[in-house]
Image (cartoon, rainbow, N blue to C red):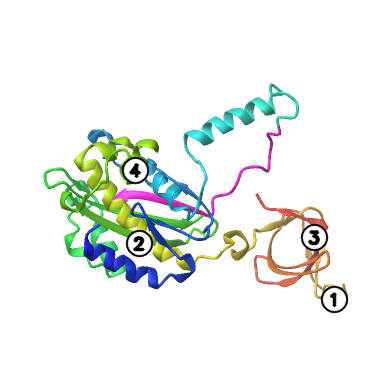
Amino acid sequence: MSRTCHALFAVALLAAPPLALAQQADVPVCSRNLGSIAVIEPTGQNWWTGQRLASPAALIKVYVNRSRCFTLVDRGTGMQAMQAERALAASGELRGGSNIGKGQVRAADYVLVPDVVSQNRDAGGTNIGGLVGGLLGNRRAAAVVGGVNLKRSSADVVLTVTDARSSEQVAMTEGHATKTDVGWRGAGGGIGGALLAGGASGYANTEIGQVVAQAYLQAYSDLVAQLGGLPSDASASNVSQAVTLTRPGRLLAAADGSGTAVRDLEPGMLLYPTGTRVGTMWEVEDEVGNRGWVNSAQLSNAR
């Protein structure tokens, strides 16, 4: 990173003290885990294979692993292989005691998508650079000229993080780099060595790959600083999952059953827990806003 970028990153870290970040091989390292995250390959035009690069998802996974900010969950090739194993288990082909079955897969708290900035209006593209600059008030908005420029060896990239439960976009950062920003510490160590070991060798071995990797590193560093305020338990901090009624019942006015019933309930109705419980009784709301109490023995998670 340039001296200016280091200074700006240091300022950003002051705004996110819960993470207690430290620099290690230019990748920010977190003192606490922010939850589980799935890195998803961007949709749309594939710009990386023409440059003999791996998907940018592979690059970001290297950064995630080195930063220790998130637990990485696989939603790509590893997931496909895992599903094949589960199919074998379901068909009875695996040995007894294999311990493969339902309820074991860890949920992704967040989804991270790496992409390049696109301003190709002739191809019907969206002015993402202007959008990012407008949302973030970014100092580099004027420098965003669109994607990866081979002639100038420059790259403008975007990282977005979405809450997997609420679908809320919790962060968006951009990164910009040129060949003058690149300073690898040898292919055998530092970031270069990490990329080789992490299956993103093209980013370490080519000039444009190093430029793109540096741009994503800048965006990831800003991203970690932005996410310093995330809750320590993403699952518990989110709105409770909807439940359904398994048999006919009543929405009671009080947890102890006193008073008149608010309404009758039919099997299959969607109810939304408020988080308040008294013994086996849960406080819930129906789809039109009626609030009352039901016995949790009558409920199952909506799927």
Q: CA distance from mark 1 to mark 2?
A: 55 Å
Report x, y in % for residue 178: 18, 51
Q: Which residue is mark 4?
A: 56
- Rounded to the nearest whole Å, what is the CA distance between mark 1 and mark 4? 59 Å
Q: Amino acid at mark 1?
A: Thr
Look at the image and tell me whether residue 48 can be seen.
no
**At which x and y percent is residue 180?**
16, 52
Q: Which residue is mark 3?
A: 296
Residue at 29% x, 38% y is 187
Displayed quadrant of residue 23: bottom left
Q: Which residues are magenta?
A: 99-117
Question: Residue 149 appears at what percent x and percent y?
Answer: 16, 46
Q: Is residue 83 left or right of residue 162?
A: right
4 or 3: tag closer to the N-terminus = 4
Q: Are marks 3 and 1 in contact (CB under 8 Å)?
A: no
Residue of label 1: 260
From mark 4 to mark 2, how far is it between C-alphas?
Answer: 17 Å
Depth check: give the residue in front, 292 or 208.
Answer: 208
